[in-house]
């Protein structure tokens, strides 16, 4: 395969290139729409004599509306603050986001996909009624998850844990070379470089052999990383490709819901899931934030079916005639505990990712150990963390020591005082950036996936994760946590007191709008 097809040339960064690029044109159209809305607002203000009184009455009505709305209380406080400062524009913006303009069709299509595919994966009743599952309340969790999707609890699945993206990458390349039927990839970030170039070369070779190769990436990649015509380029190599929620010149709440999932399925035999995107920093090449700590799992066996179906549900969202390949696998995997892949959709009103985390915290007996890049908590999750610690559970959270986003870093620090005061241990990874999303508890439960402890992951993104119960690799996950902990600095009263003034001020200022970030 020609090298030009699997290594993307870096685009020029000059101002003229940006102005006349697709991104520049999109931003221009968006700016024009904002200017039109602003002009209409000024026109109403100047033309109607009683506009101020109307605005006041309208704002009071919106306050009553907010108090009776079902949204999270942290979000309510944010909207109340905005309405107090900018009454009429804020109420219009709230109405706009609640109406989901430009996103209703996607929401309806998502429901259709879930309804149409629930029949494909059935829960094995013998698995869910086993004494150890009933005693641990895993059957309750499984039933909850299946209210909004199709997430069976599986046996006969082997799980391998990777403590670094570097480790996962080596195995991923080996597994890709074994593909015979299909390769499905769905990632938040795809970026040029050694990692993606190495993967893409294998994908092109496999496509030439007749393997069905499909790639999805989040539409934001088109703005910052990949050219707009990238799907056409890959089509020349026999690879089907599409962006999810591509950016267009028209304002829409559609852009608020990003595809943050990381799924790779090979032949319905093997699946990869975790925090690792397809970009060099995830394998510690060229990281700007010190050592990049990330994690992933590889599944082999029956549970791979769920990730196959998750991919196809997203792929078929934009297909006129959806085709559902058989999700079954003939792999004879050893019985390695219980595995339950699941996803979280921002369109169904269910906070699946947060609910699973809270379930672990409330049922923990000895410890809950967490790795997350961001800590932007709502009331429910912060209460669950504090309650677990206050009843004697060893709750520890590892966060980045070198942040990728100063605003997120500052917001995380606004929770330090409250959490440490309740007995939660907070640690910062001194060598660099933690991008892992891991919960491990009591040597028997763990979650590895894409779901951060922040508003965007818990409320606004398409996410996925792998729930593990009594699998052998749980000991590997806890060992990795302890190894990572040994490289961390502990947050205590003194470090909080002497925190940089910049982060204290930034955190306190932007915390009022944290649910909108």
Image: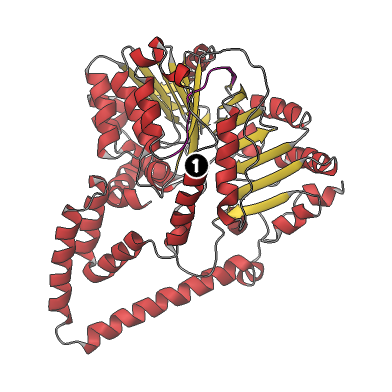
Q: Nearer the viewer, residue 13 or 239?
A: 239
For residue 335, side relative to residue 443 (left or right): right
Q: Where residue 497 sits in the image (x, y, percent)?
A: 27, 32
Q: Residue at x 14, y 59 (%)?
A: 64
Q: Where residue 58 sits in the image (x, y, percent)?
A: 17, 70
Q: Nearer the viewer, residue 267 or 277?
A: 267
Q: Is residue 98 magenta?
A: no
Locate residue 43: give its quadrant. Answer: bottom left
For residue 278, side relative to residue 238 (left or right): left
Q: Is residue 153 magenta?
A: yes
Provide the residue designation for mark 1: 404
Locate residue 164: give its quadrant. Answer: top right
Q: Where residue 86 sits in the image (x, y, percent)?
A: 24, 67
Q: Main secondary structure of the magenta part?
A: loop
Q: Where residue 360 sits in the image (x, y, percent)?
A: 35, 23
Task: Give the extent of the magenta segment.
Answer: 149-160
Examine the rendering and report whether any part of residue 51 can be seen.
yes
């Amino acid at each position: 395969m020609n090298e030009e097809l699997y290594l993307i040339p870096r685009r020029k960064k000059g101002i003229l290139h940006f102005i006349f690029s697709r991104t520049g044109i999109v931003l221009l159209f968006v700016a024009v729409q904002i200017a039109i809305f602003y002009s209409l607002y000024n026109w109403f203000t100047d033309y109607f004599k009683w506009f101020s009184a109307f605005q006041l009455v309208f704002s009071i009505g919106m306050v009553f509306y907010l108090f009776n709305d079902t949204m999270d209380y942290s979000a309510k406080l944010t909207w109340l603050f905005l309405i107090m400062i900018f009454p009429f524009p804020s109420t219009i913006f709230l109405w706009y986001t609640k109406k989901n303009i430009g996103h209703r069709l996607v929401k309806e299509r998502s429901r259709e996909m879930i309804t149409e595919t629930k029949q494909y994966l059935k829960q094995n009743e013998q698995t869910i009624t086993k004494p150890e599952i009933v005693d641990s309340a895993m059957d309750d969790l499984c039933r909850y998850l299946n209210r909004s999707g199709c997430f069976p609890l599986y046996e006969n699945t082997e799980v391998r844990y990777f403590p670094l993206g570097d480790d996962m990458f080596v195995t991923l390349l080996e597994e890709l070379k074994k593909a015979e039927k299909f390769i499905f990839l769905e990632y938040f970030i795809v970026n040029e470089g050694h990692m993606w170039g190495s993967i893409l070369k294998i994908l092109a070779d496999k496509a030439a052999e007749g393997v069905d190769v499909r790639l999805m990436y989040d539409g934001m990649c088109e703005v910052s990383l990949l050219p707009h015509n990238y799907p056409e380029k890959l089509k020349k190599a026999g690879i089907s490709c599409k962006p999810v929620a591509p950016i267009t010149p028209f304002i829409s709440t559609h852009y608020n819901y990003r595809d943050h999932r990381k799924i790779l399925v090979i032949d319905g035999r093997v699946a990869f899931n975790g925090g690792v995107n397809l970009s060099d920093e995830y394998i510690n090449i060229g990281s700007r934030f010190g050592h990049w700590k990330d994690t992933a799992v590889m599944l082999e066996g029956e549970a791979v079916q769920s990730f196959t179906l998750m991919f196809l549900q997203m792929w078929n969202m934009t297909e006129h005639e959806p085709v559902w390949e058989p999700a079954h696998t003939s792999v004879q995997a050893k019985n390695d505990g219980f595995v339950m892949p699941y996803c979280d959709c921002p369109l169904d009103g269910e906070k699946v990712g947060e609910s699973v985390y809270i379930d672990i915290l409330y049922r923990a007996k000895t410890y809950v150990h967490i790795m997350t890049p961001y800590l932007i908590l709502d009331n429910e999750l912060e209460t669950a963390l504090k309650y677990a610690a206050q009843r004697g559970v060893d709750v520890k959270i590892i966060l980045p020591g070198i942040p990728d986003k100063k605003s997120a870093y500052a917001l995380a620090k606004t929770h330090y005082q409250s959490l440490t005061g309740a007995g939660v241990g907070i640690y910062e990874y001194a060598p660099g950036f933690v991008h892992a999303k891991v919960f491990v508890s009591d040597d028997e439960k763990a979650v590895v996936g894409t779901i951060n402890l922040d508003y965007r992951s818990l409320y606004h993104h398409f996410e996925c994760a792998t729930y593990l119960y009594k699998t052998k690799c749980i000991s590997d996950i806890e060992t990795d946590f302890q190894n990572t902990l040994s490289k961390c600095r502990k947050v205590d009263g003194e470090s909080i007191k002497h925190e940089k003034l910049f982060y204290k001020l930034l955190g306190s200022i932007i915390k009022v709008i944290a649910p909108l970030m």
